[in-house]
Image (tube, rainbow, N blue to C red):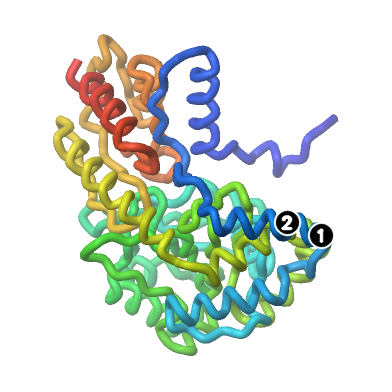
Amino acid sequence: MQLSNLVQKIQPSATIAAAAKARELKQHGVDICEFTLGEPDFQTPIHIRDAAKLAMDSGKTHYTPTTGLPELKAAIVAAVQRDEGLTFDSSQVSVANGSKHSLHNVLTAVCNPGDEVIIPAPYWVSYRALVEIVGAIPVIVPTSEKDGFCLQPEQFSSAITSKTKLLMLNNPNNPTGAVYPVETLEGLAKIAVEKDVSVLSDEIYSKLVYEGNTFRSFASFGDDVAARTVVVTGVSKAYAMTGWRIGWSIGPKEVAKAINNLQSQQTSNPCSISQYATITALEGNQSCIEEMREEFVKRRSYTLERVRALPDVSLAKPGGAFYVFFDVSKHFSRPLGGGVNVENSSDFCAGLLEAAHVALVTGDAFGAPGYVRLSFATSLDILEKGFDRLEKFLHS
């Protein structure tokens, strides 16, 4: 059967591909230190799991409204008011099968073929593909390690053309861990209003922010900014609920209505059990978030110490999420790991996995050649073993 031109152009997610390769080696008995997936290694908190069991046992296993239960939307609105001080209406909320689905919904709802979407690089691996799937044109704007990998207002302004429809902003950022300074967000927001550009703000890591950094939702910079902003987030990262597949978007009512129509033809409702569990996550005791964040603080501190001790490597200190993104380009064209020669980040990751059994993700997939991403969402024991191997690989 002949495949469509569109699907033939789509490349598999680099993070999922790297994890699959690591998993394949593990199945063959190889001891792999795996730092590829952006997934907390914690168990979903017990009160959330109990809520799911109760929902199943009480028969809440049927269709729900297309973009989410009314009580879940109300819980989302209340949580945003509690955590961000922002006021929304339930009619502005669209619940989907994870935040990636929400991103696709928003892009489909607002973009026409030929529209330009500005994406700061480094960017999450799926952004470019999601834009291209809807026929829009990704406009990649490189950011620098010097600027903490944050898009600067003047860069945003220079990238805008008559075809610009949307800015895709990720704060805190995957893969860099960058948390945008409030003054930088203010500058971006001012330009978005002046030039009438909409913003899709991916804030999935907003609850994983570390000392010295302040998170502000992009929608918080005034009514004129909120009118042009769709925020996407979910429970995957903060509540260790990656497999439950619940994300949502909050934005103008006309966008939410369009997403409802789209999703009614596309997937219908997200999993009913996961929705009831999410209500408990949002309304229940929030101390579980801080307990996990404090563990990430320890892992981040250890990870930064080990990365900074590596030879000929540089990075911008991550302020959020659970990644470090570091430059390994000085090791290109050198014999590594007992004779491995690499010419780019993809070669580096392949050689590291083969020779040292450490799995990272290439910066090539994030629009940042020369860099690699390491997820510290794993135990300190595994981090220690992995860094020992990485250090030996670079020194050998």
Residue farthest to the top?
Answer: 338
Q: Are marks 1 and 2 in contact (CB under 8 Å)?
A: no
What residue lies at 30% left-to-right and 31% top-to-bottom?
381
Estimate the x, y position of residue 153 in percent, counting from the top left: 33, 71
Direction from residue 278 to residue 389 in the image, left or right: left
Estimate the x, y position of residue 284 in percent, counting from the top left: 52, 68
Q: What is the three-letter code of the residue carrying label 1?
A: Gly
In the rendered view, tell whether residue 342 sits above or below residue 272. above
- Give the secondary structure at mark 2: loop
Q: What is the three-letter code of the residue carrying label 2?
A: Cys
Look at mark 1 in the image and give the residue it sits on. Answer: 59
What residue lies at 60% left-to-right and 47% top-to-bottom?
243
Q: Earlier in the sequence, mark 1 or mark 2?
A: 1
What residue lies at 76% left-to-right and 62% top-to-bottom?
269
Direction from residue 134 to residue 193 in the image, left or right: left
| Near-viewer residue (53 or 296) | 53
Kindly report the distance in space between the C-alpha atoms of the residues bearing marks 1 and 2. Answer: 13 Å
Q: Is residue 373 in sight in this rendering? A: no
Look at mark 2 in the image and give the residue it sits on. Answer: 271
Q: Quadrant of the C terminus?
A: top left
Direction from residue 89 to residue 162 in the image, left or right: left
To which quarter of the image does residue 180 belong? bottom left
Residue farthest to the bottom?
Answer: 223
- Give the secondary structure at mark 1: loop
| Near-viewer residue (247 or 70) | 70
| Near-viewer residue (158 or 221) | 221
Q: Is residue 52 in sight in this rendering? A: yes
To which quarter of the image does residue 375 belong? top left
Q: Residues within 10 Å of mark 1 (few under 14, many from 20)?
A: few
Direction from residue 70 to residue 286 in the image, left or right: left
| Residue 198, label in figure | none
Q: Quadrant of the N terminus?
A: top right
